Structures are given as structure tokens and as C-alpha cells.
């Protein structure tokens, strides 16, 4: 049958079926194309994914007792994905109790460091590698100290990890409410564990390439589809992302690194006068995915919008940080649209163009049966991947768990990182 024989779906506008329900039915059936949320109606474990699953990922899944007999990964059910904006807003729209585990931790982190054979800074200002520590073996005191270390150093890396999917999820649940993402591919049976696997999305039509992969860093609308646009996760949430763990059980020996950027240091790059101007300002943050307005469904997708402080205070460190990212910070309140655009562009560049406030995490080489885990604080950072291996060597496969944190706030009495540490502010 040729494409000319296939008719596009049409609205029948039956009197007994409300328009919004008819549109929702067509979208969820998979008959209507929608850029990000509903690529196809088929869901559940994918047998095709097993054909390209890296050996290290397969071994970890089997050792964790994950049932992949029907396929891998699990694709989301379209019925669970909101079509309308009001439905999307309603997800996690109520405040829930949050405990900042790092707030009362031992500032010297004696219990955590006692378990390590080496503590290696990735750079002067950002990132630490802990050698000899197995995340699966940490007790609560060590988890609290680790939360504080991550809050201070942005990202902490652990090589040669034996970390089951259950233990990764357990860590996330200790640090906060685990985000369950309805749009992303997942580990079967574990909706709180997202699969990070660009080779799989490429097998389904993702057109990421050497030419287009970084275009999103000029304008997010050109995102190449490999998380290479500098961003912060889930800023549209009422209580945005806190600690996130990403465990790679398969990675090329060289390439596929992830870059992390410090929000503390980005704030301290600003002049003292400009800091005073920004302190107390608020901005609008948007979701990555779009949804239809129930009252105007033909206007095209709209995004969830939340208002948060532009400069936030971290509850564990008490330090101020710059809370912006090019992909999802829409506008600053209280200034004109032109002023907002100019200021935000400068603030995005502050993050992205200062090499001394960045660190690069190398995942490989990874021994079969082991993995590399990075845990970062999404509040005080941005991150992006590097797709320089171009999928021509060992596949890059990982699993991610994100714990949501507090409702963002700004304490006018809080200090910047350099101020708190007694470092020069104008040198």
C-alpha cells in the first residue's frame, strides 16, 4: 500500500464526543504525529532493543534480576502521558515534605572519607572522585556526608562500581522524592529509573550527527537529540531536581564525556553591583515537553511555566547560586522583554564560556560487569554530554535516577561561595 492510500486522521466532531476528548483519542492512538511526546502508540518492553543492547548493560540487568525476557528498554504508555497543559501542571503540583540530608552532615565528612582510598579533585573548583568507595555499601551517615560533598563540589564520581538498579533507586529515594518521567524510556519494572541510550533513539529515527549535535548551544530549538545542549533538569517542577545519579554500565574507552558547570562559581563571576541587581529577581522556567491548551487546542503545544528565584540559596551549604540555563529559562520578571533577553544571554554565557568553573567526567574505560557513577546536584549546576564517539565504538548506555528537592528560595542574608570561603571577590 502506497503512502497515497493512507488518509490522515480527521476530526469527526460527533456531538456526543467533546472536542478535547476526540483530539486526545487521536493523539494517544499514535495516528497523529507529535514532535516529542507521542512518537508511536506501541509501548512496553521493546524486543528490538535487545538486539543492540551492550554486553555490560545486559549483564547488569540480569544480575539485578530485571526481567528483560520481553524486551528492553520499556517504552512509555501513551495513556500515561498528559495531552493537555492542565493535566501536566497537576503532576506533583502539591508541596511534599523534603529533608535536606546534607544540612546536618559532618562538615569534615570523616565517615565517608574513611571509606575512600583516595579523594581526587577533578578541577580546582568543580568535581571530586572518590576511589575505593562502593555506593551500595554506604550507611546513612555516609550518605548524608556524600550529599554535602556533592552540594559543595557539584559532582562526585565513583569508578568500578557494582551498583544494581535497586540500589541506585534506593539511593535516590533516600535523598528525596524520585521523579518518574512519563515520556522517557525506562528500565522495565522501574518507572523511576530512566534509560540513557542515544544509540537506541538513533535506531528509532533520532537524526543526531556530527554536524548537528551541538547546534542547540546556539539556540535550543536546534537540539540535536543527544543531551549536548547545556541544561539543568526539571526546572519547571514545583520542587525541581536535587541530587541525580547517572550510572554507566557501558561506555567507549574514549569519548562520550559529560561536562558539569558550577552555579556557585557562575554567580561569583558577576560584579558585586550586578549581583545586587539580580538578588531577589525571579524568572520563568519552562518544561522540555509541550502540551495542548484544552481551551485552544489548535494553537500548538505550550509548555509548563513556573516562577522561581533567579538567584537561589542552597539549603545545605547556605551559598548563593545562579539558577539559569539556556534551554529552559524563558524570561526575567520585572524588566522589559528586551532587557530580559540581553541579561539572560549574558548569564547563559557566564556559565558556558568560563572554563575554570567546569569539570569533565570521563566514564570509560569500564570493566565488564562494573560501571562508573556520577552524582551531581542539579540545583547548583548545568551539564551536557559530548557525542564525539559518534556511536562508532562501544555503545554509551546508562541509567539515571533523580530525586526532587525543595521549593526554590532566596535568602537575602546568604553568602556567595567565595565570600563564605574567604576568597577574594574582585580579583
Image: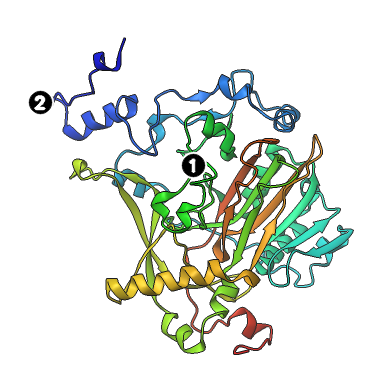
Q: In this view, does 419 lie above or below 191?
A: below
Write down the quadrant of residue 423 in the picture.
bottom right
Q: x, y percentage for residue 28?
A: 33, 28
**Which structural element holds mark 1?**
loop
The residue under the point 46% across, 72% down is 347
Res 93 seen here:
no
For residue 181, the mark is 1
* Left or right: where 24 falls relative to 211: left
The residue under the point 78% across, 42% down is 366
Neighbourhood count class around disc 1 (C-alpha, 10 Å): few under 14, some 14–19, many 20 upward? some
Res 68 seen here:
yes
Quarter in which the C terminus is drawn: bottom right
Q: x, y percentage for residue 340?
A: 34, 72
The residue under the point 38% across, 33% down is 38
Farthest residue to the top: give it: 1
* Left or right: where 85 falls relative to 413: left
Q: How is the image coloured?
A: rainbow
Q: Pointers 1 and 2 in contact (CB under 8 A)? A: no
The answer to which of 394 and 99 lies nearer the viewer is 394
For residue 390, the mark is none
The answer to which of 144 and 285 lies nearer the viewer is 285
The residue under the point 59% across, 21% down is 71
Farthest residue to the left: give it: 15
Q: x, y percentage for residue 285?
A: 39, 61
In 3D space, how far apart are the residues under numbered discs 1 and 2 (Cα atoms)? 35 Å
* Left or right: where 416 falls relative to 128: left
Quarter in which the N terminus is drawn: top left
Q: x, y percentage for residue 384?
A: 57, 54
Neighbourhood count class around disc 2 (C-alpha, 10 Å): few under 14, some 14–19, many 20 upward? few
The residue at which mark 2 appears reads as 15
Amino acid at each position: 500500500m502506497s503512502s497515497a492510500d493512507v488518509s490522515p486522521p480527521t476530526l469527526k466532531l460527533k456531538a456526543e464526543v467533546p472536542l478535547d476528548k476526540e483530539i486526545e483519542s487521536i493523539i494517544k492512538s499514535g495516528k497523529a504525529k507529535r514532535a516529542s511526546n507521542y512518537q508511536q502508540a506501541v509501548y512496553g518492553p521493546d524486543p528490538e532493543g535487545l538486539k543492540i543492547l551492550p554486553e555490560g548493560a545486559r549483564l547488569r540487568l540480569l544480575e539485578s534480576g530485571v526481567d528483560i525476557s520481553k524486551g528492553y528498554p520499556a517504552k512509555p504508555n501513551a495513556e500515561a502521558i498528559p495531552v493537555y497543559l492542565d493535566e501536566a501542571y497537576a503532576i506533583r503540583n502539591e508541596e511534599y515534605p523534603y529533608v535536606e540530608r546534607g544540612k546536618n552532615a559532618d562538615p569534615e565528612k570523616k565517615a565517608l572519607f574513611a571509606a575512600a582510598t583516595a579523594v581526587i579533585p577533578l578541577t580546582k573548583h568543580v568535581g571530586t572522585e572518590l576511589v575505593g568507595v562502593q555506593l551500595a555499601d554506604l550507611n546513612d551517615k555516609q550518605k548524608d556526608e556524600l550529599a554535602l560533598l556533592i552540594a559543595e563540589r557539584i559532582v562526585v564520581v565513583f569508578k568500578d562500581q557494582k551498583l544494581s538498579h535497586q540500589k541506585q533507586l534506593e539511593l535516590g529515594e533516600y535523598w528525596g522524592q524520585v521523579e518518574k518521567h512519563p515520556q522517557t524510556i525506562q528500565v522495565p519494572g522501574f518507572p523511576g529509573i530512566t534509560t540513557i541510550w542515544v544509540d537506541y533513539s538513533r535506531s528509532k529515527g533520532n537524526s543526531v550527527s556530527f554536524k548537528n549535535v551541538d547546534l542547540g548551544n546556539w539556540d535550543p530549538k536546534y537540539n540535536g537529540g543527544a543531551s549536548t545542549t547545556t541544561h539543568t533538569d526539571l526546572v519547571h517542577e514545583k520542587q525541581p531536581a536535587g541530587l541525580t545519579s547517572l550510572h554507566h554500565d557501558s561506555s567507549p574507552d574514549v569519548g562520550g564525556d559529560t561536562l558539569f558547570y558550577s552555579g556557585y562559581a557562575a554567580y561569583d563571576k558577576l560584579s558585586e553591583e550586578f549581583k545586587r541587581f539580580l538578588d531577589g529577581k525571579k524568572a520563568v522556567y519552562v518544561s522540555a515537553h509541550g502540551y495542548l491548551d484544552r481551551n485552544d487546542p489548535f494553537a500548538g503545544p505550550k509548555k509548563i511555566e513556573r516562577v522561581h528565584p533567579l538567584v537561589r540559596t542552597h539549603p545545605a551549604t547556605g551559598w548563593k547560586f545562579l539558577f539559569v540555563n539556556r534551554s529552559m529559562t524563558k524570561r526575567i520578571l520585572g524588566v522589559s522583554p528586551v532587557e530580559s533577553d540581553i541579561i539572560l544571554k549574558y548569564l547563559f554565557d557566564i556559565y558556558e564560556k568560563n572554563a575554570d568553573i567546569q569539570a569533565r567526567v570521563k566514564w570509560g574505560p569500564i570493566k565488564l560487569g562494573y560501571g562508573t557513577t556520577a552524582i551531581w546536584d542539579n540545583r547548583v549546576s548545568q551539564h551536557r554530554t559530548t557525542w564525539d564517539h559518534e556511536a562508532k565504538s562501544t555503545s554509551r548506555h546508562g541509567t539515571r535516577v533523580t530525586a526532587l528537592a525543595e521549593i526554590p528560595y532566596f535568602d537575602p542574608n546568604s553568602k556567595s561561595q567565595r565570600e563564605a570561603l574567604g576568597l577574594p571577590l574582585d580579583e
